[in-house]
């Protein structure tokens, strides 16, 4: 994209290295660089490898913010775009960092140095390694550098950083559940004091106010200006009100509702709510030595109002026990019930079938004498049938039938 009036594009770029370390370089050869390109940059000796994060006019804004002169001739240069060989060497050096960091810590412990080696960063060409450490006091690490140079065969540079810079390089998740501000977007570290927590009426608990770096959280400064502006018209937290009923002390301050809670010295459990304007009015009367009857005459009556329903569940699954599993019956009772259910319909079906068959069954016809339809069906029963016929012939007409 061409700039208006034939203006030349800004010839500086911002390059990011390991763990959000960023520096500015001059693109003197006017290479077509874009965000995300890997470039080989000038270093103190050799070259380094980084990724382009900003180009053109946005770089000028960042340089003004960080007070870097873009007209200076001392800015390092961009050599070229990274080749496959450059990336391969750089990746091989990155794979060695964890092993070298572990070994260097063992050497520092053997020398009994009061320091903590937190990170190692190799240069792009693998000729030098920078060790970042934190320490409370000054450390003499001359012997450490000799031992590490002998063990690793590279040039060693030691750089001391603060605890916040250490958290910035290592990163992590804060107590809010988000990634640390210092490792994502925060660039400058302002001093944070306990007064920031007092203005916001937070409990001075170091475990809750401290971040992963062990210092006070940087986010305590985010809303500090709003609280300071709101507290300008508020009475001090240690305000005392003189009334005829007794001396009253301030127990609580609510900036958002603009209310203060007071209690008498003899009745510390009984609190009275006053607005900011009423408290200032009583303070003026006390200053003018005018009598104030009691706090009850100025107290604000809190009326319980029904909260407006903002959300209503249409499905009707608001019950907290909707996911609870009902208690299952015992196994024996389950078997008994199943047997009764299966047995009852079978007996009823059988009785109904028998009754129906009895009503529909025709009367059995009497077989006439001398019928021979099934006589020869069973050869073993043939002699019995012949004997029966002989007995019937021998009977007289008046004899009863068998």
Image (cartoon, rainbow, N blue to C red):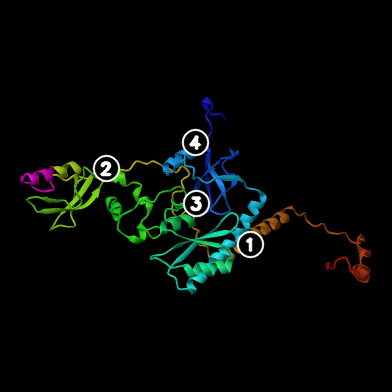
Circles 3 and 4: CB atoms closer than 8 Å:
no
Mark 1 or mark 3, which is nearer the start of the sequence?
3
Closer to viewer: mark 4 or mark 1: 4
Which range of residues does the magenta coloring cover? 281-296
Q: Which residue is mark 1?
A: 343
Closer to viewer: mark 2 or mark 1: 2
User: Vertical placement of 347 versus 69: above or below?
Assistant: below
Q: Does the segment drawn in magenta span residue 370?
A: no
Q: Which residue is mark 2?
A: 229
Q: Which residue is mark 4?
A: 57
Q: Secondary structure at mark 2?
A: helix
- How far apart are labels 3 and 2 at the CA level? 36 Å
- Mark 3, other Cα within 10 Å: few <14 / some 14–19 / many ≥20: few
Q: Quadrant of the C terminus?
A: bottom right
- How far apart are labels 4 and 2 at the CA level? 36 Å
Residue lying at the far front in this picture: please name it: 73
Q: Quadrant of the N terminus?
A: top right
């Amino acid at each position: 994209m061409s700039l208006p009036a034939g203006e030349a594009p800004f010839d500086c770029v911002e390059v990011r290295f390991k763990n959000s370390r960023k520096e500015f370089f001059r693109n003197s050869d006017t290479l077509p660089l874009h965000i995300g390109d890997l470039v080989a940059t000038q270093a103190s000796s050799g070259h380094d490898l980084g990724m382009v994060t900003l180009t053109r006019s946005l770089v000028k804004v960042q340089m003004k913010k960080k007070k870097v002169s873009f007209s200076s001739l001392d800015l390092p240069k961009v050599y070229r775009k990274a080749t496959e060989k450059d990336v391969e060497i750089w990746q091989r050096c990155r794979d060695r960092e964890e092993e070298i960091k572990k070994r260097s810590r063992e050497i520092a412990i053997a020398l009994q140095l009061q320091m903590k080696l937190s990170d190692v960063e190799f240069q792009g060409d693998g000729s030098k390694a920078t060790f970042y450490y934190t320490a409370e006091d000054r450390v003499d690490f001359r012997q450490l550098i000799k031992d590490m140079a002998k063990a690793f065969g590279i040039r060693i540079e030691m750089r001391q950083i603060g605890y916040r810079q250490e958290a910035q390089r290592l990163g992590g998740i804060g107590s809010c559940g988000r990634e640390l501000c210092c490792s994502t977007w925060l660039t400058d570290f302002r001093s944070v004091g306990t007064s920031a927590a007092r203005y916001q009426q937070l409990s001075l608990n170091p475990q809750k106010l401290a971040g992963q770096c062990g210092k006070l959280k940087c986010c305590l400064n985010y809303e500090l200006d709003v609280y300071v502006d709101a507290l300008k018209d508020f009475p001090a937290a240690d305000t005392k009100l003189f009334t005829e009923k007794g001396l009253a002390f301030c127990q609580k301050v609510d900036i958002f509702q603009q209310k203060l809670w007071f209690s008498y010295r003899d009745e510390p459990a009984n609190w009275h709510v006053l607005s900011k304007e009423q408290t200032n009015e009583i303070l003026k009367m006390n200053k003018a030595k005018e009598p104030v009857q009691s706090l009850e005459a100025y107290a604000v009556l809190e009326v319980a109002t029904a909260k407006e329903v903002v959300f209503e569940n249409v499905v009707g699954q608001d019950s907290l026990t909707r996911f609870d599993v009902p208690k299952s019956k015992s196994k024996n009772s389950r078997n008994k019930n199943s047997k009764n259910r299966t047995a009852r319909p079978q007996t009823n079906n059988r009785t109904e079938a028998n009754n129906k068959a009895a009503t529909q069954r025709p009367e059995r016809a009497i077989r006439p004498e001398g019928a021979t339809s099934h006589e020869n069906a069973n050869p073993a029963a043939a002699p019995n049938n012949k004997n029966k016929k002989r007995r019937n012939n021998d009977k007289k007409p008046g004899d009863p039938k068998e």
